Amino acid sequence: MITFVPEPHLLDSPRGREWPVLPATRAAASPAPPPGADVVIVGAGPAGLAVASALWHHGVRDIVVVDRDGRPCGRFFDRVDLLGQRVLRSPYEHHPGVEGYRDCELLDFARLHWSVLTPVERREIRMAQAGHRSVVPVDVFEAYCRHLAASHHVTERTWRGSVREVLPTSDAVTVRADRFSVTARHAVLCLGEERRSAPDTWWGGGFPPRGVSYWDEPVPPGGRRLAVVGAGLTAAHLISGGLAQGREVHWVVREAGERYQCADVNSSFFRPEGRARFDGVSWSDRLELMGRFRRASIMFEFRPMLEAAEAEGRLVVHRGKAITKVTPGVALHLEDGSRVSVDHAVLALGTTPSIGDGLMPDDAVLDRGGWPQLDERTFAYVGAPRVFAVGAA
């Protein structure tokens, strides 16, 4: 069998380029939104931006977007830049644009700005046009999201606020934030995902010991030895950053080996036959499929770089060794009795979808093992039909 390994220079798309933009749309003029609206969207990440843009095409303009950052996709790109990430795993076909309404889609946007792109990025567009897997530069995606937010008037309908409660009734939904409340006919929860915390057994729960941080926090400068714990794409970016700084990086992987593939879920599930396979079975069978096929993996492009670093001794990989304890110092105690001592350790343990628990009553969420119970046709909560979930949940 022949395995195709893409070239690693695809990971080096430029960041921070000047892009032609639409006339600037103003941010929300008032510190608080109106008390009522047709739709409240909670979260202005890529999913929230997609919903707001779609509603604009449907003629639903009386919307309020509430976001903890207050910028469409702001938190998403802050996290991406913290990792030093230059390209996205998702192909050009997966984007927040609105299909079927003569809207500018992500591939259209990239082609319209051909002169800004590098030769490598242009080749990826040709690959996408031919129906092959392609890599989307973060810079292109951010410029596209800004275009969507401006052209669909999302920026001026976005308010900064931390949502405390979502209270559904039979004829309305009230969203209560830290500084205001909005009551609407419908609410759409686009809550995204949050980092997965380390097991309490590692250090007794609570905040990590000194010298240990999570992937969505800055890695302090200095120190010769860095440990990265995790088997996914985030871990690969952290390792790449540590190697670029000249550090000796120790990679702790609980599984017997790392996995390289296009997505965390096998790409066959994105095709019609794969979706039918997933949708046509019981909930317990779906959970079994997710447990078997939805696993941490790394883009193929990282493989040559990481294998070369390991061969040269700059990267030490501890495969098949789960952590049992973390002690100040920093020492990672592994299940085989060995210990990894480093100056700093970063935990990239994955994410969990935010499903609305803690915001809505339990009988509205109907939590099924970390997933909400939704109407499969409309994505409305079965326990709260005026509330919808879009995105990770």
Image (cartoon, rainbow, N blue to C red):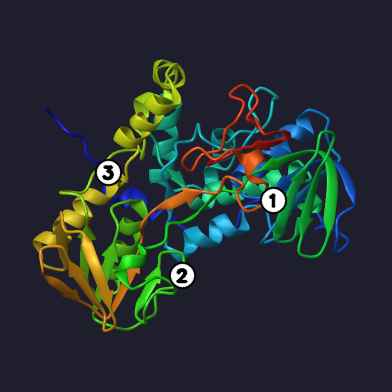
Nearest to N terminus: mark 3 or mark 2: 2
Q: Which residue is mark 1?
A: 21
Three-letter amino acid code of the residue under disc 2 = Glu
Q: Which residue is mark 3?
A: 300
Image quadrant occupied by the N terminus: top left
Evaluate if marks 2 and 1 touch, with contact meaning CB atoms under 8 Å apart. Answer: no
Callout 2: helix, strand or loop? Answer: loop
State the CA–CA distance, disc 3 to disc 2: 25 Å
Callout 3: helix, strand or loop? Answer: helix
Q: Position of residue 258 (x, y in %)?
A: 21, 48
Image quadrant occupied by the C terminus: top right
Q: Position of residue 379 (x, y in %)?
A: 63, 30
Q: What residue lies at 41% left-to-right and 43% top-to-bottom?
A: 89
- Whether residue 204 is situated above or below residue 57 in the rendered picture: below
- Whether residue 245 is situated above or below residue 309 in the rendered picture: below
Three-letter amino acid code of the residue under disc 1 = Val
Q: Nearer the viewer, mark 2 or mark 1?
A: 2
State the CA–CA distance, disc 1 to disc 3: 33 Å
Which residue is more in the foreground, 212 or 238? 212
How crowded pointer 1 is (Cα within 10 Å; few <14, some 14-19, many 20+) is rated as few
Three-letter amino acid code of the residue under disc 3 = Phe
Q: What residue lies at 9% left-to-right and 60% top-to-bottom?
A: 311
Q: Position of residue 262 (x, y in %)?
A: 33, 38
Picture quadrant where residue 246 is located: bottom left
Q: Which residue is mark 2?
A: 217
Residue 57: numbered disc:
none
- Whether residue 380 is situated above or below residue 8 in the rendered picture: above
Which residue is more in the foreground, 363 or 28? 363
